[in-house]
Amino acid sequence: MSEQVAPPPAPQAEQAGQPEPVAPAVPEQPEKPKGGGAKKALGIVGAIVAFLVIAALKFGAASAIGNFLNPDETAEAKAGDCIAELPEVTGTEEQSVSDAKVVKCTSTEAVYNVVGRVEDQTEAQAKTGKSCEQYIKEGDDGYIFYNIAPGGKGYLLCLTKKA
């Protein structure tokens, strides 16, 4: 039972012999849970997101999501374009690159000329370098840049150092 505080009785009420007034008891109302609807909505949204992620992984959309988050800036490169600085490699050495980009050939960032592009290449074909032999002149320093998913096919760019 809760305690109630009432104002002191009026002096004339005591004199008249009337009983002291008592404040009526107010029943306590239970608090309504807050955020119940929001929690339910978040649960539904979470379930939908989880479903979409699983569906994307199952049906191969993971690479599309990956491309959206980390786009391949050389995907549209063609002969006549220029590429910014890449890691220096010698001989048959290979290096992974995550930030290659096409730049204007008049830019100070331009380091390589794209002299050829070859489509539908496997990783093994790209590593031989034979596909670029027709594009790279004798005496030029030739480089091969490729973007090929393991076990799949992709493109390779035939590059020479910009003069």
Image (tube, rainbow, N blue to C red):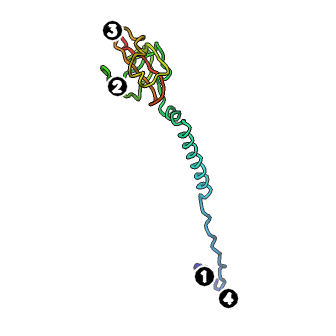
> Residue beneath label 1, please?
8
Other-residue count near label 1 (Cα within 10 Å), few / some / many at <14 / 14–19 / ≥20: few
Given contact means CB atoms under 8 Å apart, are the residues at marks 1 and 3 in contact? no
Residue extending farthest to the left is 90
Q: Is mark 4 on a helix, strand or loop?
A: loop
- Taking 19 as reference, is 144 above or below it? above
In the image, taking residue 100 as reference, residue 12 lies left or right, namely right
Of badges 4 and 3, nearer the viewer stands 3
Please tell me in which quadrant of the rendered image residue 112 appears.
top left
Q: What element carries label 2?
A: loop
Q: What residue type is labelled 4?
A: Pro
Label drawn at residue 139: 3
Considering the image in quadrants, where does the C terminus appear?
Answer: top left
The residue beneath circle 2 is: 94
Q: Which sits earlier in the primary sequence, circle 2 or circle 4?
A: 4
Residue 56 location, x and y as percent? 55, 39
User: Separation of disc 2 and disc 1 at Cα?
Assistant: 93 Å
Task: Give me the residue at 62% from left, 64% from top.
Answer: 32
Q: Mark 1 falls on what kind of element?
A: loop
Front position among marks 2 and 1 = 2
Q: Which of 7 and 68 is in front in this view?
A: 68
Q: Residue at left 32%, top 21%?
A: 92
Q: Earlier in the sequence, mark 4 or mark 3?
A: 4
